[in-house]
Every structure is written in structure tokens, then in C-alpha cells.
Image (tube, rainbow, N blue to C red):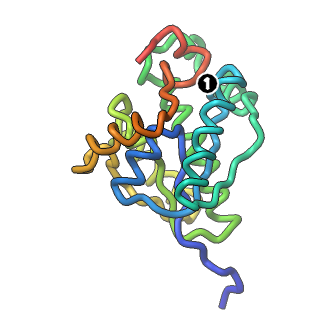
Amino acid sequence: MSNIVRKCHLLHVCCAPDLVISYLAGARGDLFFYNPNIHPQQEYEKRLNEVLRLAKLWDLDIISVEYEPSDFFERLAGSEAGIEAEPEGGKRCEICFRLRLEKCAEVVKKSGYASFSTTLTASPKKNVQLINNFGIEVSEDTGTMYLPNIYRKSILYNDAQKLINQLGIYRQGYCGCAFSISTPY
């Protein structure tokens, strides 16, 4: 019998607006803010501070890691040439999604969480099927449990948008990486 005390769920959080949508859709658990793709560091800190504000408001525990953009750039460097020029939603994004889900699964396994999911599926700009497929693959590779979801399909999506506005949540103008700055939402 294992001595690990199982924690409930770890929710990877990409940004505060997607956290609001996910939270109103029923997502619960400890929060995990790992987003080495976000550029520049000031943007990373803005997004983290907004997530910290929500965590305090809703009394949620949060795990954040040091800002390590080298994680993202090293992963891109190991891929095919020209990946930086891929359009938004292309292979560069696939690498980014997988990187963040792998790190989340690593924390799940190390810290004894029962499962994980991601707020990436709250964004209307993201390919939900692709993200969920990566989550399932990562969970199979790591012996963890990924809970596929589509947080943006919640009947409370419009309420989430109103709450984001009421709380004055910072809304970023681009996905996050240095290559998406020129592709505003």
C-alpha cells in the first residue's frame, strides 16, 4: 500500500480569463501556473499576478514555477526548422501545449494528485480536441490521469465574460509566445 496521500486535482492555468471560464464551468483543484512560452517576462508576471489574485479571491492553492522561457525555446530548437514562422495554431502551438501538459503531469505524479486538466480548453482560440488528445497521450506516457474537458462549452460562458469585466481581469492581446505577439486576438 502506498504512503502517498492523494491530492484531488491539479488544474494547469494559462491565464486568468480562462481560469474564470473554467472555474464557473466547475473546474476545481489546486492551480498550476507553468507557461514558459509567455514573452516578455513582464507579460508573464502580469498574467501570473492576475491568476494569484483569483486564487486569493477563491481561496485556491497555487503552484507556480520560476519563469523559464528557455524550456520553451529549447523545445522549439529541437523541432523542425522554421517552426517559429508557423501560423498561430500550428506545430509551434502543438509543441507548446505538449510541453505544458508534460510539466503538469510531472507535478501530478511527483505530488500525488489524482488527476489533471488545463484551462487551455476554455479559450475559443484553441483546438480543444488537439489539447485533450495531448493530455490523454501525456497521461498514458506518465501513468497519470488527464480529465478531458471543454470548459468553453459551459452554459455559464457568458456569465464568465461578465465576471471577467466586473473584476477588471487583465485580458492579454495575444496568445503568449514571442512569435504570437504579431498575431493579436
Q: Residue at x 64, y 24 (%)?
A: 43
Q: Residue at x 52, y 65 (%)?
A: 9
Instruction: Give the crowd class for mark 1: few <14, some 14-19, many >=20 residues within 10 Å.
Output: few
Figure check: 164 above or below 104: above
Query: Circle 1 — which element?
Result: loop
Q: Position of residue 160 (x, y in %)?
A: 34, 43
Would you name the residue on which mark 1 appears? 79
149 or 79, which is in the foreground?
A: 149
164 or 120, which is in the foreground?
A: 164
Q: Quadrant of residue 4?
A: bottom right
Q: Position of residue 145 (x, y in %)?
A: 49, 64
Extreme-bottom residue of the structure: 1
Q: Position of residue 37 (x, y in %)?
A: 62, 29
Q: On the picture, is 167 further left or further right than 37? A: left
Q: Count of labels shown?
A: 1
155 or 72, which is in the foreground?
A: 155
| Quarter of the image where the N terminus is located | bottom right
Figure check: 101 above or below 78: below
Q: Position of residue 28 (x, y in %)?
A: 47, 62
Q: Residue at x 72, y 33 (%)?
A: 71
Figure check: 16 above or below 171: below
Q: Residue at x 42, y 58 (%)?
A: 27
Q: Amino acid at mark 1?
A: Ser
Extreme-left residue of the structure: 155
Q: Quadrant of residue 25?
A: bottom left
| Quarter of the image where the C terminus is located | top left
Q: On the picture, is 162 further left or further right than 136? A: left
